[in-house]
């Protein structure tokens, strides 16, 4: 039973406001957004921060949702789930996600993240407009805009990591900080 | 042609289009997981409207949030309006943003740069 206390302390020390591990569904997404909106309302966050955090939450959660949605036929049930956490340290919000990704998709994702991280504000704006207007659309409508938008709203570099896991998968961790 | 009315929900905006007055309103949040499906009726009615448009078409876009999945669909809506504008109707798009919401203003400017229709950026007070 001590374990629960340890979990509690760990989450408390890490300033976790909300965490979820499991399958990301449309209903869950709605609930998390509502909870976070109420929390930020209670904390009396400036509208600017509230909007940025909300926008990034939407994109991060929908990334997880679509990722799982698209892959669920080949993915093992236990790898069908994702980790989502939001924390606030010294007034700075950070949104963290973790999920398994098939090894063959890792290089493509890495390439996209590095390309985005190499850009400054103005370059991201140009790149966003380019991708917005290129006519390509994924089946769900996103078409590669999500990460660019996250980077623009965040105002910081995207922190990420890929850790090799079993059976041709990697664990993809993403940490998005919201500039004050 | 019948009016299009879609009531807003926590994830989708209110949409009203009246072909006999040429007025389109998009208001609220647009964060559905599947935007293509949601925007389909609006795209379709705008296509039909282009065949028999009014002299003036006025568009109010009052979005609080929109996700990137919606942003491509919104561009498609604007492209339909661009076609209407180069046809027999004069189109104006009013893009509303709350004061201090630079991201929403910038989003409007991004569209303005792509679409050849007069845009008006209108700042409103926070609710």
Image (cartoon, rainbow, N blue to C red):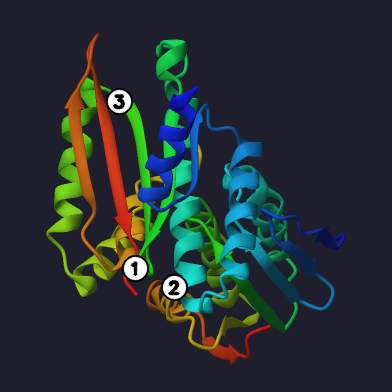
Q: Secondary structure at mark 3?
A: strand
Mark linked to residue B107:
2
Q: Chain of mark 3?
A: A
Where's residue A78, x and y in %?
43, 14
- Residue A10 x, y percent position in the rendering: 37, 41
Q: CA distance from mark 1 to mark 2?
A: 29 Å
In the rendered structure, the answer to whether residue A35 lies left or right of residue B66 reads right
Residue B85: give x, y in percent of width and height: 58, 77
Q: Tag 2, which chain?
A: B
Q: Does residue B10 show up?
A: yes
Q: Position of B115 compared to A25: left or right?
A: left
Residue occupying image coordinates x 26% and y 27%: A171
Name above or below for residue A119 compared with residue A79. Answer: below
Observer-side mark, 3 or 2, equals 3
The residue under label 3 is A101
Give residue A90's mark. Answer: 1
Q: Are marks 3 and 1 on the same chain?
A: yes
Residue nearest the viewer, comparing B54 with A165: A165
Q: Residues within 10 Å of mark 2 (few under 14, many from 20)?
A: some
Instruction: Decide which of B112, A76 is in the foreground and name it.
Output: A76
Is disc 2 on the same chain as disc 1? no
Callout 2: SS: helix
Which chain is mark 1 on? A
């Amino acid at each position: 039973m001590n374990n629960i206390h340890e979990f509690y302390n760990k989450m408390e020390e890490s300033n976790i406001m909300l965490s979820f591990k499991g399958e990301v569904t449309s209903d869950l997404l709605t609930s998390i957004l509502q909870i976070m909106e109420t929390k930020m309302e209670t904390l009396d966050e400036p509208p600017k921060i509230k909007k940025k955090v909300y926008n990034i939450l939407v994109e991060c959660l929908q990334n997880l949702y679509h990722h799982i949605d698209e892959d669920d036929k080949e993915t093992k049930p236990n790898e069908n789930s994702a980790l989502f956490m939001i924390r606030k340290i010294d007034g700075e919000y950070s949104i963290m996600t973790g999920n398994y990704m098939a090894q063959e998709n890792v290089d493509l994702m890495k390439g996209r993240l590095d390309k985005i991280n190499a850009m400054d504000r103005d370059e991201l704006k140009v790149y966003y407009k380019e991708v917005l207007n290129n006519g390509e659309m994924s089946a769900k409508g996103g078409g590669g805009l999500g990460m660019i938008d996250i980077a623009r709203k965040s105002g910081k570099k995207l922190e990420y990591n890929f850790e090799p896991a079993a059976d041709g998968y990697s664990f993809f961790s993403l940490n998005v900080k919201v500039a004050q | 042609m019948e009016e299009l009315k879609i009531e807003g929900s926590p994830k989708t905006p209110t949409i009203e289009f009246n072909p006999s007055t040429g007025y389109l309103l998009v208001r609220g949040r647009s964060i559905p997981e599947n935007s293509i499906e949601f925007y389909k009726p609006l795209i379709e009615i705008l296509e039909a409207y282009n065949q028999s448009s009014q002299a003036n078409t006025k568009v109010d876009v009052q979005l609080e949030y929109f996700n990137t999945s919606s942003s491509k669909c919104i561009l498609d809506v604007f492209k339909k309006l661009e076609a209407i504008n180069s046809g027999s109707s004069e189109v104006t798009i009013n893009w509303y943003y709350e004061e201090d919401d630079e991201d929403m203003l910038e989003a409007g400017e991004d569209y303005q740069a792509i679409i050849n229709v007069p845009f008006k950026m209108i700042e409103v007070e926070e609710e």
